[in-house]
Amino acid sequence: MNILGIGGYSHDSAAALVCDGQLVAAVDEERLTRQKHQGGIPYKAVAYCLEAAGLTLDDIDHIGCYMRPGLRIARRWPYRLTQMFRSPLYSAGYMAYEAVHNAMYAYGMLGLRGRNTRLHFMEHHPAHASSAFLVSPFERAALLSIDYVGEFTTTWLGVGEGTTLKRLESRGYPHSLGIFYSAITDYLGFLRASDEYKVMGLASYGEPEYLDDFRRIVRVHPDGWYDLDLSWFCCHYRPGTRSGYFSEKFLRRFGPPRGKGEPIEARHRNLAASAQQVLEEAALALANRLHRTTGLKQLCVSGGVALNCSMNGRLRRESPFDDIFIQPAAGDDGIAIGAAFQLYHSLTGAPRAFVMRDARLGPSFSDDAIRQFLDRAKLVYETPPDLEARVADLLAQGLIVGWFQDRAEFGPRALGARSILADPTRPDMKDLLNTYVKHREEFRPFAPSCLEERASEFFSGCTSSPFMLFVYPVEPSQRARVPAITHIDGTARVQTVAKDVQPRYYRLIEEFEKRRGVPMVLNTSFNVMGEPIVDTPSDAVRCFYSTGMDALALGGHIVVKR
């Protein structure tokens, strides 16, 4: 049975293909269109998934879509009617927008069908939860899904067993941790729904000076649930994208919002730190509630908020769960995986036979295809007999290397397929990368890719973290050895590399250790700020020559700037 899953529409649209219970392909539309956070119907992503499996739309039995438009209108329209007296024009316009938006979404999904295809509109948060649980190694697990808003739900608690999921409790709009964090992102002068990770990085440079205030904004109750004090917000009844998300009450207390490009002051850093801490406290309270309710030892976390690595690290360190699984595309794009697997198991009754250990599910290019491209582009390149040793030499010399190998990763993280690599032992490397390669804010940290069995030597409590979704403390005795990946708060967002999953990347790190003495390399995404991660050799070469990278490893070939 062949099932397509579709994730996202308002933003981050994607497609995934499950054939007879195996995930064979998944890609974000943005990688193929080159438009960051591309929304809409993911035509190019669908075409890639079909091509990867040698199928056509007529071979697809079912398509699972990431939301139920009828449920969305049924829940959102009544709420907008309650806000009509506060903002009549916006409420009426929003209701009209919802009608058009959902009609276009449903019509676009219908257009994807082949001759024998059945279309299914899946509920948003159960599909989120399925995207984690049904590809996890756990037979039973507590489930926590946190995002901005689905059809109307913002936080969903459940339990998974075998191939079935059961909802336990949920919280509805406008009480949303995702909305709260997006509001802070907007207030601090970053882009909502895309720059939340900047707030997470900035938080480490501040002190939680405003934590008492933020605990009044996000009220965590003794039973583990939370709600928002809506008197601090205005986005639930007027357009936050144009007028700001916070009310005059918030602005009187904390001052005017930071404009894009304006200097970052101590006040901004402390606001970010306070927001991050209250988010972590709310997530911990939810996890504790889930544990009390289920008594289970494993937890699966999903939804866009699950991309907050600092929150995840604290859940791993302080929650009562023994193990936590988060798949690499935890946002709306990853619903493509959840929708497909949820349909497969419900329709066939088949047991689970797939565990996600590798995010490399996107397009790939053979060495011959890369060589032909380099020849057509008239670029000078070498094809060394030992690629990993040659790249390790370049890194050990202090060079910054683009690393383009195998299939592209699914989700927002570069995990050793479309990466920029550097030496983590050099104290100046972080500033060099931010200034000359990534062209981004100086407070942004970089992550290590570490040999899996060696991770615990450098990162406290880290045994396996293949998708770079958890922050771990760097062992105090090791921080001076790896300054370029140690954040200002003494932590690092770790990726562990398993030999049987990524043998070439693993061997490169082994070769690098022989030269510089540490079993890791600095790894950041192969892109510049504002652009998607590169997908093709052409994308890689364009990015390489527009930045301060020194060398580029494309498959088995290397280009070095002279």
Image (cartoon, rainbow, N blue to C red):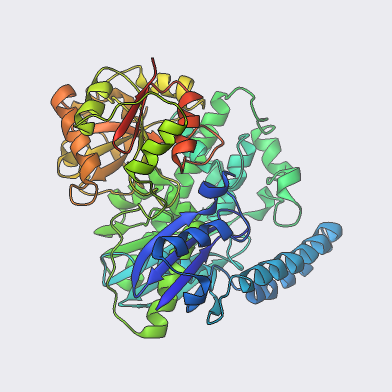
Which residue occupies 29% across, 23% down? 483
Q: Up-down: is 247 above or below 75?
A: above
State whether residue 468 is above or below residue 202: below
The residue nearer to you, when weighing 448 against 560, is 560
Residue at image coords 59%, 52%: 179
Q: Quadrant of residue 213?
A: top right
In the rendered image, residue 432, in percent from the top left (x then y), is placed at 41, 19
Asked whether the viewer can see residue 115, the reply is yes
- Locate residue 458 relative to residue 89 in the image: left or right: left
Q: Residue furthest top?
A: 562
Q: Is residue 381 above or below residue 44?
A: above
Answer yes or no: is residue 83 visible: no
Q: Residue at x 32, y 63 (%)?
A: 299
| Placement of 318 over or under 338, stated as above or below | above
Q: Where does residue 320 sit, x and y in percent of width and height?
A: 28, 59
Q: Position of residue 511 (x, y in %)?
A: 17, 31
Can you give x and y, in whole percent of width and height, for residue 404 in the image? 36, 38
Question: Is 521 positioned to the left or the right of 45 in the image?
Answer: left
* Residue 129 falls in image quadrant: bottom left
- Quarter of the image with the C terminus is top left
Disc count in the image? Answer: 0
Is residue 43 rendered to the left or right of residue 536? right
Quadrant showing the N terminus: bottom left
5 vs 489, nearest the viewer:
5
The answer to which quarter of the image holds residue 417 is: top left
